[in-house]
Image (cartoon, helix red, strand yellow):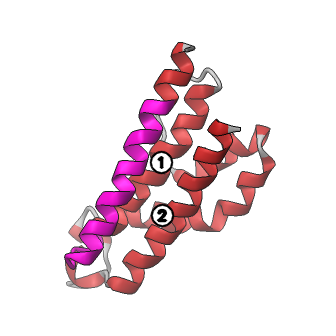
Amino acid sequence: MDANIREAERWLRQGERDLVSARNSCRSGDFEWACFQAQQSAEKSLKALLYARGFRKILTHSVYELIREVGISEPSFLALKSEAKVLDSAYIMTRYPDSIVGNLTPSEYYDREDAEECIEHADSICSAARQSLSG
């Protein structure tokens, strides 16, 4: 098996595992953590596609930027841009208390609805990545 494909599979496996962790966090009420893990799932799944195409070090953490890059060769991914933007917002806001206006912490700000939305978006991206790598 080609080294790029092996690396891509490794990133996709971790992306899929992060999605499982996001679901577990949502079930346990850790909604901000579920949102962050969902973003990580989408990010790693998209990076898997780029590794499969021969990319080496991918420095961005932006799901939106990764969607745009993948979309150059697979335009169907561009339909996931709005989902990517939601996940990018979660990437910052779930990590730092000062990213939220007012006096709330991420754990007080994010709720089940937010977590479920992020998980749904990550699942769509992860599934599309898996399908693309398999096809």
Within the image, what quadrant is residue 32 found in? bottom left
Q: Is residue 93 visible?
A: no
Give the x, y percent position of residue 88.
48, 60
Nearer to me, 57 or 121: 121
Give the x, y percent position of residue 77.
71, 53
**Quadrant holding the C terminus:** top right
Check the image and report above or below for 30 versus 47: below
Nearer to me, 87 or 97: 87
Nearer to me, 100 or 118: 118
Nearer to me, 49 or 102: 49
Magenta part of the chain: 9-32
What SS does tag 2 mark?
helix
Q: Is residue 112 visible?
A: yes
Q: Is residue 29 magenta?
A: yes
Give the x, y percent position of residue 110.
31, 80
Give the residue drawn at x 48%, y 48%: 43
Residue occupied by mark 1:
43
Give the x, y percent position of residue 109.
28, 83
Q: Pointer 2 and pointer 1: residues touching (CB < 8 Å)?
A: yes
Give the residue drawn at x 44%, y 68%: 119
In the image, taking residue 2 as reference, residue 92 lies left or right, namely: left
Q: Amino acid at mark 1?
A: Glu
What SS does tag 1 mark?
helix
Q: Amino acid at mark 2?
A: Leu
- Categorize mark 1 by other alpha carbons within 10 Å: few (<14), some (14-19), many (20+): many
What secondary structure do most residues of the magenta stretch adopt? helix
Residue occupied by mark 2:
87
Check the image and report above or below for 15 versus 105: above
First along the sequence among labels 2 and 1? 1
Give the residue drawn at x 37%, y 42%: 14
